[in-house]
Amino acid sequence: MSESSADRQAIHEEMERARRTFHGLLNTADGADLGRRTDGTRWTNQQLLFHMLFGYILIRPLLRLLRIFGRLPRGVSRTFARLLNAGTKPFDVINYLGPLGGARVLGRRRMGKAFDRVIADLHRRLDAERETDLALAMHYPTRWDPFFRDVMTVADLYRYPTQHFDFHRQQLTLTPEP
């Protein structure tokens, strides 16, 4: 197995682990669990679960951006990342408000189905990636998320939502999974 195919397999396994964990969390949580405040955020558990799902949903548009900026001179994405970093405060407001409505609109059952659809789509996309495309890179706004690095590749982007997921998993205050 080549190094990149091993990397792909590891990414697939990470996403599947997150999918199983997400369903385990949803299936064992009752209404009181979902409405309880999280540890270290202003969200409830249900809102944070939506935020964790949204980390995966964002990969499609982020991949589109990376495919554009990854083919331009590196200075273009560096400038773009600096502009986004300058807009961190409005981003933080939107990032906070989104899960307030998203969790309410989707609810528990639809969040689980959405997670399955998004992960299945990411599996298909990852399998279809050419080796050269996995190496495309651009600068990212490092102030937007602790898991955004200054320069990220397509392969890094596929790993990002699970890093985000694992971080926020520790902030949930749900009854432990069986």
Image (cartoon, rainbow, N blue to C red):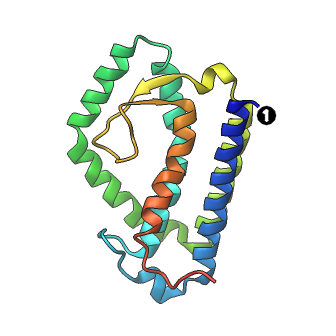
Q: Which residue is mark 1?
A: 1
Is 57 placed above or below 85 here?
below
Is 13 placed above or below 124 here?
below
**Residue 41 seen in render:** yes
Is 3 placed above or below 41 here?
above
Q: Residues within 10 Å of mark 1 (few under 14, many from 20)?
A: few
* Residue farthest to the top, as pictured: 73
Q: Quadrant of residue 100?
A: bottom left
134 with respect to 62 (left or right): right
Which quadrant, please, contains the N terminus?
A: top right
Amino acid type shown at disc 1:
Met
Question: Which residue does the image show at 31% across and 68% down from the upper left?
Answer: 41
* Foreground residue among 177 and 117: 177
Which quadrant, please, contains the C terminus?
A: bottom right
Q: Position of residue 86 (x, y in %)?
A: 20, 35
Is 76 placed above or below 60 here?
above
Question: Which residue does the image show at 67% across and 66% down from the upper left?
Answer: 20
Q: Position of residue 132 (x, y in %)?
A: 64, 19
Considering the numbered disc 1 on the image, is that residue within a helix, a strand or a loop? loop
* Foreground residue among 155 and 49: 155
Q: Quadrant of residue 101?
A: bottom left
Q: Position of residue 11 (x, y in %)?
A: 64, 45
Question: Which residue does the image show at 47% across and 85% down from the upper left?
Answer: 33
Q: Position of residue 104 (x, y in %)?
A: 46, 70
Question: Which residue does the image show at 54% across and 49% down from the upper left?
Answer: 57
**Residue 102 seen in render:** no
135 with respect to 35 (left or right): right
* Foreground residue among 119 and 94: 119
